[in-house]
Image: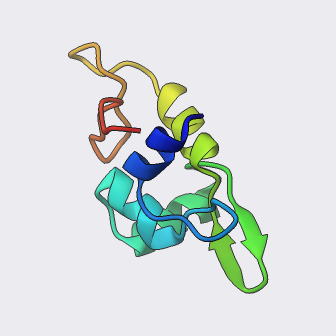
Amino acid sequence: MSEENTQEIGSTDDKGLMSESDVAEVFRITPRTLRAWRRRGYGPAHVHVGKFIRYWPAEVERFIADLPPGPNGAREDHAGVSQSTGI
């Protein structure tokens, strides 16, 4: 993944990880919805950093890429996020 793509995804911490808020913004959902996804085993893979949940940008990209095509041929999840989100 290029540095340019990392910048498009949103802010990352000093290890290149994204916060819940960053990922929720990508999917246009609330952090609360993202937490509900995690409890159901849905959504991008995450890691625990101390008491915080963080996401690797590549895992967010992989999750979007693995979504089934929607009716218009674009890959969409249940929040209606298209693969063309700039990630």
Q: How is the image coloured?
A: rainbow
Residue sitting at x 34%, y 61%: 25
Does 29 sit left or right of 18 as displayed? Answer: left
Answer with the quarter of the image where residue 19 lies.
bottom right
Residue sitting at x 52%, y 59%: 37
Does 36 sit left or right of 25 as displayed? Answer: right
Examine the rendered structure and indicate whether residue 52 appears above or below residue 9: below
- Quadrant in the picture for the C terminus: top left
- Quadrant in the picture for the N terminus: top right
Q: Nearer the viewer, residue 25 or 67?
A: 25
Residue sitting at x 63%, y 59%: 16
Does 44 sit left or right of 7 as displayed? Answer: right
Residue sitting at x 51%, y 70%: 20
Residue 84 % position (x, y): 30, 30
Residue 10 % position (x, y): 41, 58
Q: Nearer the viewer, residue 19 or 82?
A: 19
Examine the rendered structure and indicate whether residue 81 appears above or below residue 27: above
Q: Nearer the viewer, residue 12 or 78?
A: 12
Residue 5 % position (x, y): 46, 40
Extreme residue toward the bottom, this view: 51
Does 15 sit left or right of 12 as displayed? Answer: right
Tally the marks: 0
Extreme residue toward the left, this view: 72
Residue 14 % position (x, y): 65, 70
Extreme residue toward the front, this view: 3
